[in-house]
Image (tube, rainbow, N blue to C red):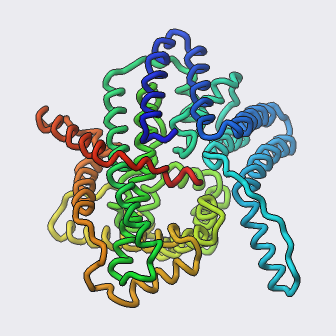
Amino acid sequence: MLFNTFNYLTFLLFIFPVYWLLNRNLKAQNTFILLCSYFFYGCWDYRFLFLLIFSTYLDFFTGKKIYESESKSLKKMWLIISVGINLGFLGFFKYYNFFADQAATLIELMGFRANIWTLKLILPVGISFYTFHGLSYVFDIYNDKFKPRESFFDYAVFVCFFPLLVAGPIERASHLLPQVERKRVFNYSTAILGLRQILWGLFKKVVIADNCATHANKIFNDYQHYNGSTLLVGAVFFAFQIYGDFSGYSDIALGTARLFGFELLKNFSYPYFSRDIAEFWRRWHMSLSSWFRDYLYIPLGGSKVSKLKQVRNTFIIFLVSGFWHGANWTFIFWGFLNAVYFLPLLLANKNRSNMGFVDEGSLQQKLTDGVKILITFFMVTLAWIFFRAKTLYQAFDYVYRVFAKGLLSRPAILPWELLALIVFFMMVEWRGRHYDFALAGFGQKQPAVMRYSFYYVVLLLLFVYACKNQEFIYFQF
């Protein structure tokens, strides 16, 4: 059930009034939203509902056992059981064929004949996300940062809440579970804010991402026949495709959660306005970046170790992040390349130089920030080529061809209508960059006529471009 379909709209229109009619009975309300979440997930593939429920109960059960254990060794044993089984399922469905292929290649390089079976596996949708939800719960209990819950239904809502179930954001028990456990009262202003966020998320997905995908796919699928400038345009279109696609999903998820009285973790904060790669990674897929920071980077010593170990920790984080995205060397190299980008900032102690938003300033400051933003965007766009390519050879060949011939010539594909839409999109994002999402502050100063005219234009564009119904990129992760 895609967010950008009438099926999802019908689903929302049905469960929204029933949910709020049950608000006098918190247990009934939570049970209802949990059943709706299972239905939502079952619409993808009901065969994997058992895996979702089993994973949820596993972490609920082991969390209690960790808390009740009196010895450190017993706590660690239950933690290992939870982590081992969770990562075992994730590794089997997502990485078995990758490791099997690599093993076969290694055996053949050694001069032997390899006969290793691969399996035709369907990747359970959202497994990378709901696995990390549960792991954060048991990690926090193990580290004495959180107490286990008595109600399985409340905990299951935290793991399975349908807006975040298949593509995040990756929630923390300490943030979402208290909201599940307390009475929620309908708030008209919050609901309107949620609708604005859903609207803007749909615009990002339907108008920006899906249109960029059409041209990016055309160029990437036949890249050997285009000049350098066209290939660069294709990479830029993919950069906007993946941002519009994933941040659009996150906006719809957060907006939907607001309709039901929940505040989810923010996942994007205008990353393409970043002035260096460190700032970019503080603004891109923030829930995943903070998850790796808290549960991998800091336990490794974080930044409180020698510079050499800081470099090691940085490469581990980026390589694991790349591998989390998919079982392909392209994702691993994408992570490696971002670590290389990050390294000069780390060595010069400048990785926290740009902590705030880009703001207005002197003309010189504006020009300086503008140049930094363009350079960072160019670096990120080159890295996205490895994310998009099917093989490392294709990625390196694509990058080589960008600079080999015709980089300064006229692109063969340059859709002015799409470029105008991207400019409009970025102008709205720029004006709203100090808010949680671009339309959060819209209407506070604008006259009603201007505000509603803007909404009508956005809705009109949605109807014009609403025929593609493409899946969200991050559903494959």
Q: Is residue 169 above or below residue 417?
A: above
| Residue pictured at 64% horizontal, 52% vertical | 295
Dividing the picture into quarters, in which one does residue 171 lie?
top right
What is the x, y in percent for residue 454?
A: 19, 41
| Residue pictured at 38% horizontal, 55% vertical | 209
Task: Spot the residue most to the bottom.
Answer: 404
| Lateral position of residue 336 relative to residue 17, left or right | right
The answer to whether residue 12 of the structure is visible from this angle is yes
- In front here: 420 or 222? 222
Q: How many marks?
A: 0
| Lateral position of residue 370 relative to residue 125, left or right | left
| Lateral position of residue 42 relative to residue 344, left or right | right
| Residue pictured at 60% horizontal, 36% vertical | 41
The answer to whether residue 353 of the structure is visible from this angle is no
- In front here: 269 or 314? 269
- In front here: 357 or 45? 45
Query: Which image quarter holds the C terminus?
Result: bottom right
What is the x, y in percent for residue 432?
A: 26, 47
Task: Spot the residue most to the front.
Answer: 467
- In front here: 83 or 23? 23
| Lateral position of residue 432 relative to residue 319, left or right | left
| Residue pictured at 30% horizontal, 77% vertical | 412
Q: Is residue 274 above or below residue 24?
A: below
What is the x, y in percent for residue 373?
A: 31, 67
What is the x, y in percent for residue 211?
A: 35, 57
